[in-house]
Amino acid sequence: MAAFDERMAPVLLLWLAACLSGTLAVERPNFKTCDQSAFCKRQRALTPGESPYRALLETMELTNTRLTLQLKNDKNKVRLLLELYRLQGNITRVKINELKPLKARYEVPDVLIREPPTEPLSLLSQDENGVVLSLGAESQRVIVSARPFRLDIMEGRDVLLSLNSRGLLAFEHLRLRKDTFSYLITSTLASVWNNVTSVFSRQADTEAEDADLEDEAILEEKDEDGMWEETFKSFTDSKPNGPTSIGLDFSLPGVEHVYGIPEHADNLRLKTTNNGDPYRLYNLDVFQYELYNPMAIYGSVPVMLAHNAQRTTGMFWLNAAETWVDISSNTAGKGSSETPQTDVHWFSESGIIDVFIMLGPTPKDVFSQYASLTGTQAFPPLAALAYHQCRWNYNDQEDVQSVDAGFDEHDIPYDFIWLDIEHTDGKRYFTWDANKFPAPKEMLQALMDKKRKMVTIVDPHIKVDSGYKIHNEIKSQGFYTKNKDGGDYEGWCWPGSAGYPDFTREDMRAWWASKFAYDQYEGTMENVYTWNDMNEPSIFNGPEITMHKDAKHGDWEHRDLHNLYGLYVHKATAEGLILRSGGVERPFVLSRAFFAGSQRYGAVWTGDNAAEWGHLKISIPMCLSLGLVGISFCGADVGGFFKSPSSELLVRWYQTGAYQPFFRAHAHLDTARREPWLFGPENTALIREAVRQRYTLLPYWYQQFYHAYRTGHPVMRPLWVEYPQDPATYALEDEFLIGKDLLVHPVTEEGATGVTAYLPGKEEVWFDVHTFQKHNGGQNLYIPVTMSSIPVFQRGGSIIPRKLRVRRSSTCMEHDPYTVYVALGHQRAAEGELYIDDGHTFNFEKKEFIHRRLSLVNNNLSSVNLAPDAHFSTHSTIERIVIMGASKPTKVTLKTADAQMSQLDFDFDASTSVLTLRKPGVNAGTDWTVMLQ
């Protein structure tokens, strides 16, 4: 693309005016529907049940690690290569590529954490109709049917999943354009060859021809509109490689509920798409997006989970090109008595078919299987789990100082204050506006003195300015993405004309990472962290507000890898923060765009939402969906980015955000200031209480993120994850679990006087964490609410540590004592954990941490070391133990690690059955036992 055309200035000014005003909804005409996407239309036009593909069984090769088999399209004679792998951990991988492509097709790099280890496949049987292979445990096997090609994964007599059962496999092969010289030469040679071979032809059956005529001529196909060039609005996509789309259908017998494929502002449970567009996965800057819509927004994770009472399975479609997903069901909305089945049709614009089928069988098995492929959530610094204060923009150093002081004056804790794009010198990232921020280190030191931190924004669009060092270095090293003609790609974004670094290049990412060094990013200190926005990438004058698909990244077109761009920016930035500390400090980086694997690099948020009740509600299923596909560190802009919230909405949003993983308030440039103390003393007190609740629970949040890092299990999770056999949980999206032990039902309705929460588990009991009232599980509980209400319940049988001495920041609370909350279940027992480390370095990987099991059994509450080979010390003690559902003891005895015995004072509230043990005083990192007698 050439440099910005001044004739586009009026159009861009209108676009910017809409964005800056915050008064308009999404401009739908800026973004494609399926009917406006040529490959989507072609894939959707396929007729089920008419697959042209058959498996050529005589080409099968089976080794200890994989099966390969050719597939032939009987319409055009193109052959594909099927590869089938049995992977460790109950995963099956299926790859399909052209057998002999004209040139290599794109295969996604850098997402898998390693080449997945395989397990042996064995042949059980074979005949002219197909082959049966063993997948090892529990009678699992794969059946490959020959004509038409179909693949079924079975366990016993049950079909778990089928591929191409509806015959929608489609693989558009690379070809030469018919009006080119190369095509004319090739087609002439092919015609001569066909004439020669016809002279010597002999009678043979079809299978023999397939075996012998390996280079059988490919039959011409009729070109359709959009195959070689496609126009959307005023933008033309040159498509030099022609049609390259791929698609495959999957059938899920017995399944009605599917989840995942974020990011969409839609329900947790995915809907059928028969009467509208498919779900679209294509990272786009869609400000003030519509709700309950399958259109693409900022991020894409091509992972879907399917669940019923017997099993959970998953599909990971490893493709970074634009992708659409159709979902249909034979029973959806019909109340049918027939056996349910959900059919899913994936199709992408380019690349290959590379799909991982995760066979569970439990939800947590699927999470672990996916984590074994793409990694787990990065373990954040503890402070990153606290409260963040942000706005576009805090004006200058005095403004930052004033806001910081305001939190202290109103006794509201916070850990991070954020600076948006206006803090830079003319939108030149890695710089400061010298007039507004003349002494950034003084500002940062003042924050550091209070144990607080700052986040500054660093976007991936680089101002084209010969006086800008960053631009000059990128240009001189040839690091910019190229346009289709080989020049540097330029687009229009916040700085004006901007270049876009090619983050797919490892050397470019290493250079970018080096720019975060303290001597490169001048004015920064160790309490500065980073925010990557606009990294879809957002290009104001580009098609669909993003990069042209025919832009070039080395040998590849942007179309091949579009959804990876944001991940690469996130990765390079996180590596830069690690590098600047010599590999010691954990980074914190927030990214708007993401892909599978982005969890390894930090946090994401739901983008440019609005101060509307609907946006508050949708934040729950949006973050739940992300957690299901590995990205636990998710949040939404508290209060809404666009527009100005009422005081009621703002309070309710703080109450909700305090129980979501990433807790940040953010607002648009044109909105009224909304720091927590600007809505009157009563609302200030309500917001203060919500934020303080977050801080008391930081030990539990931190422990949950440690588990997410170790296991891949989501921190914020739908109820069905813990209660997979309870159909009442399958569509719930207005309440959620944090870990397995806290249930939260935020108030998200305007003017609400009550909410109805479903408490799962017929054998469970749940305790209101505010009143300690006990409720039986397996019921819908009506809860009267006031403006101070945040309905939260602790599961009976659990133990949760808290820190009740809330200070100005989380770091100020590091050495404070713990209060241990024990909720007794029906068995009069309970169990939990306590995890402690230094809160900010990678030393936990060197076994520098405390990890203890807390358990109450037979009236003995004890703390036992879960990691005897680990070593770490803490100054924190246990200052209080609160036992819910207790009986009054006659005495309470504490036994310490050195066998010292002492009596503990206690209080018992008979009206609530709460026993409080006062001042045990034992070190939180040691063994101890409390005996109730």
Image (tube, helix red, strand yellow):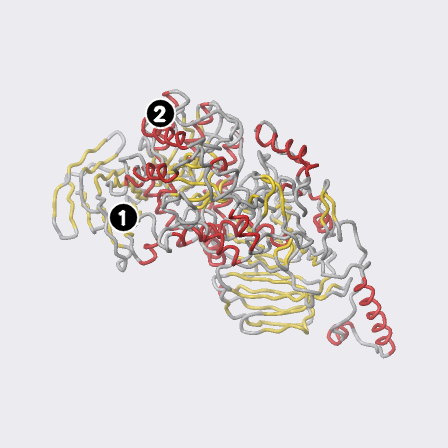
**Image-quadrant location for residue 593:** top right
Q: Amino acid at mark 1?
A: Leu
Q: Is residue 266 above or below residue 866?
A: above
Dot placed on the residue nearer the N-terminal end, 1 or 2: 2
- Disc 2 marks a residue whose amino acid type is Ala
Q: Is residue 829 left or right of residue 480?
A: left
Which residue is found at the position 44% from the left and 52% from the top?
A: 576
408 sits to left or right of 162: left
Pinpoint residue 753: horizontal percent, then vertical percent: 44, 23
* Element type at mark 2: helix
Number of marks in picture: 2
For mark 1, does the 10 Å Cα neighbourhood hold few (<14), some (14 to 19), or many (20 or more) residues? Answer: many
Residue 63 visible:
yes
Crowding at dot 2, Cα within 10 Å, few <14 / some 14-19 / many 20+, comes out as some
- The answer to whether residue 326 is above or below residue 437 is below
In front: label 1 or label 2: 2
Give 768 or 451, whichever is nearer the viewer.
451
Q: CA distance from mark 1 to mark 2?
A: 34 Å
Contact between marks 1 and 2 (CB within 8 A): the answer is no
Nearest the viewer among 429 and 15 is: 429
x then y, percent, for residue 33: 68, 41
Residue 352 appears at what percent x and percent y? 64, 59
Mark 2 — residue?
685
Q: Residue at x 15, y 37 (%)?
A: 905
Q: Quadrant of residue 689?
A: top left
Label 1: element kind: strand
Q: Position of residue 317 (x, y in %)?
A: 58, 55
Report the residue marked by disc 1: 854
